[in-house]
Amino acid sequence: MLREETPASDESGDDDKPANAKRILDAAEKCFSHYGYQKTSMEDIAREAGLSRRSVYRHFPDKAALHLQVVTSRTAVYLEEVRDRTSRIDGLSAQIEEVARIMIRLIREDPISVAMQRVDPDSLARTVTTESRELLMMAMETILPLIETARDHGETRADLDIRRAAEWIARVVFSLAATPSLSFDISDPEQTAAFLREFLMPGLR
């Protein structure tokens, strides 16, 4: 399998159609899910998409940018589920428990995450820690309205800074999902919920 990362300048280009970006993203998701990040090349993605490398590089400057787009797209799917499910749940504590449950599923069970855990755990760790700015911002924007509503209803202290609180909750949830648990079973939703109720919620009141 070729692992060439530099676009060839002498290849005939494909039409620069918007639809090609979707083909590339679908191909990248399939490759990353199968091989992990490090073992996937832009050549693999181009071949899977049925396009030239030149066409792939027209849409995405490098593999890191393409991977970020795939990960943010996958995260957006889970965050849409968060918005849907929390809209039908009363109370900030129960809502944050649902956020944690879904984000733990994203990081531990999504096919791309599973592949990275299997063949490329260092890349997964970077994705949810040092390279997680975009994902953190997405999670914050999803959590913000939950905290704002809770503050308006008197569930939190009146002077709570909701942006700082949203970032703190997002960081806690990402950490829960990405790191091993020592004093409780992270795979047990009830134990995770109890952990959040005991240690996270008091900081908002």
Image (spheres, rainbow, N blue to C red):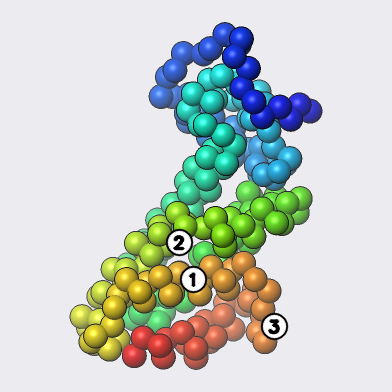
Residue 120 in sight from this viewpoint: yes
- Asked if disc 1 and disc 2 are in contact, CB closer than 8 Å, the reply is yes
Residue 105 occupies quadrant? bottom right
Residue with the mark numbered 1? 171
The CA distance from mark 3 to mark 1 is: 18 Å
Specify the quadrant that holds the C terminus. bottom left
Instruction: Give x and y (percent) for residue 11.
Output: 61, 11
Instruction: Name the N-terminal-most of marks 3 and 2.
Output: 2
- Asked if disc 3 and disc 2 are in contact, CB closer than 8 Å, the reply is no
Residue with the mark numbered 2? 136
* In front of the other: 148 or 65: 65
Instruction: Give x and y (percent) for residue 64.
Output: 57, 41
Residue drawn at the location 36% of the way across and 68% of the way down: 143
Question: How packed is label 2: few (under 14 Cα within 10 Å), some, or many (20 or more)?
Answer: some
Residue 181 occupies quadrant? bottom right
Residue 117 in sight from this viewpoint: no
Helix, strand or loop at label 2? It is: helix
